[in-house]
Amino acid sequence: MFGLGIYLADLSSKSNQYSKCQQHESTSCKVCEKKLFLCRALIGDPYFTKVAMRYAKEPPINKDSVIALSRKDVPDSAVEYREYIFYDKDVVYPEYVISYQLK
Ligand SMILES: [Zn+2]
């Protein structure tokens, strides 16, 4: 929705929506262990948006990243929960792999 970037979330439940178990290819599997990355990222001077930027390959000029505001932030936002989009892989560091199982 925000182009070719690395998408991070501040809610693990949001990230879980994109984490499929390998055996059943399910995001809601309660049998298999799933994994998420806990990342450090350099947000810099972000560009805040409530609209999609489908073809973005970089943040707007003089900005370092994009923060898609949630509907809690602005009711007519394109996304339900905040998303953090980075277009430079060198500013995102996957520090931990978290293994978990849904109950
Ligand atoms: Zn499974």
Image (spheres, rainbow, N blue to C red):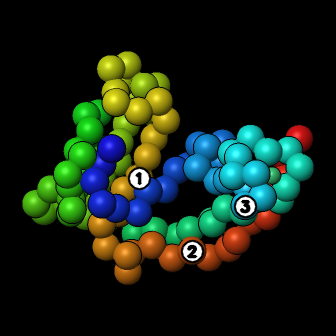
Q: Looking at the image, is mark 1 or mark 3 nearer the viewer? A: 3
Foreground tag (2 vs 3):
3
Q: Is residue 26 visible?
A: yes
State the mark number for residue 72. none
Residue located at (56% from left, 68% from top): 39
Type of the residue with mark 3: Gln
| Disc 3 secondary structure class | loop
Circles 2 and 3: CB atoms closer than 8 Å:
no
- Which residue matches tag 3? 22
- Image location of residue 71, percent across then percent down: 42, 25
| Chain-order first, disc 1 or disc 3 | 3
Residue type of the residue flagged with mark 1? Tyr
Which residue is found at the position 70% from the left and 46% from the top? 26
Q: Is residue 70 above or below residue 58?
A: above
Distance from mark 1 CB to nearest ligand 1 atom below 8 Å: no
Mark 2 to mark 3 CA distance (whole Å): 20 Å
Q: Which mark is residue 84?
A: 1
Mark 1 vs 3: CB contact within 8 A? no
The response on whether ligand 1 sits within 8 Å of label 3 is yes
On the picture, is 15 further left or further right than 52?
right
